[in-house]
Amino acid sequence: MLNKKIFYNLQICRGIAALIVLIAHANLIIDKNLFSGFFIIGWNGVDFFFVLSGFIVYYINSQYLGQANKFSNYLKKRLIRIFPIYWLYTLLVILAHVALLRVTGSNLVNWFDFNTLNILKTFLLYPTNTSINEMPIIPVAWTLSFELFFYIIFGICILLKRYYPYIIGFWIIGIILFNIHLIDVPDNQFIKMAFSDKNYEFLFGCFIAQLALTNKIITNRFLAILMLFLGISLLCLSWINEFQNLRFFPKMDAINFGLPYSLIIYALISLESSRIENRIKKIFVFLGDASYSIYLTHFIGIILLKSIVSKIGLNTYIEFTFIVVILTVIGSLCYSYIEKPLLKHINNWFYPKSVPVKLVVVN
């Protein structure tokens, strides 16, 4: 088994990605003209998450490729990581929606058609068509459909290591053909998700993880910093290109944002330190731990807080800052007192005799 290390920098990246998405939605919902809408482009934090997920899943589980007996354990851990807390938060949103509707007569969730089939699809993370504003009960959960699909693809590769280069190869070819419209596919949302160009970002993360596992990373600190600067520069260029709608290059999120984030992640791996004594760094590592709860709770939180804070008559910039800070704190508290204990109990139930170990990266 290859020697693995803890990547605190990547955990910090998870926290930053969650904050980017939170700020983007705050800009959009509170006032899309605030900052001229500049931070709305922060939806690209999702691309950051996808590259990070590809890295983490491959880095932790690559040694299981070809070990069919590890498949059920791998899949169980992935499902435990994604579903229980998502189901709980979704249920809480439904209850809040029903309570608000009965008390005030107004809807909390006005983007979702509440019927049995739609609710079932939401809980099972069936893909939604975001291009026509079709969203789950928790809107950001559309990304979890991609995550779940990637987990399944990787699980198939664990079962069929002998064929996994062909599986990945056919997947890549399918994505290419689908996105250049050379193949005619049914108008099915699952197929559209399976062959979306966003899936490249998981593969970018896997590729970086393979480089890390085989010690093919930059050892020269100056070159690593130079690559970090390059990644940030390309990210800024893509951000401005999207913000100004300049279209210096075609719109393809996997290239425009996935590649810059991949360069940033590769550079940060090269610059990794085994120490986290710095207090600020510890805070951001904690935000990385809490990123899933921050991510799942912030959208509804913005709507609820905006309806309350707007009545006070605060300056819009102060309102924006207040809501972003409060929801970061709330998401962190949800992690500490809901997500973390829940996962601990579930894992103790499934693995009662397991010895606690420190993960190389927290996912």
Image (cartoon, grey):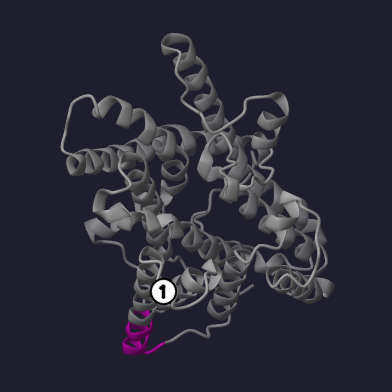
> Where does residue 330 sit, x and y in percent of width and height?
34, 35
- The foreground one among 194 and 347 is 194
What main secondary structure does the magenta stretch of the protein show?
helix
The answer to whether residue 7 is magenta is no
- Image position of 138 with respect to 222: above or below: above
Q: Would residue 360 be visible to someone looking at this image?
A: no
Q: Percent from the top left, x then y, of residue 90?
A: 55, 31
The residue drawn where x is 54% and y is 76% is 208
Amino acid at circle 1: Ile
How far across and down, in percent of the image, does residue 38 sit? 31, 58
- 226 within the magenta span: yes
Q: Which residues are magenta?
A: 219-228
User: Which corner quadrant of the image does residue 244 belong to?
Assistant: bottom left
Judged left or right of residue 289, residue 359 is right
Nearest the viewer among 278 and 246 is: 246
| Residue tagged 1 | 264
Q: Does dot 1 land on a helix, a strand or a loop?
A: helix
Q: Is residue 179 visible?
A: yes
Residue 72 is situated, as x and y percent measured from the top left of the image, at 76, 50
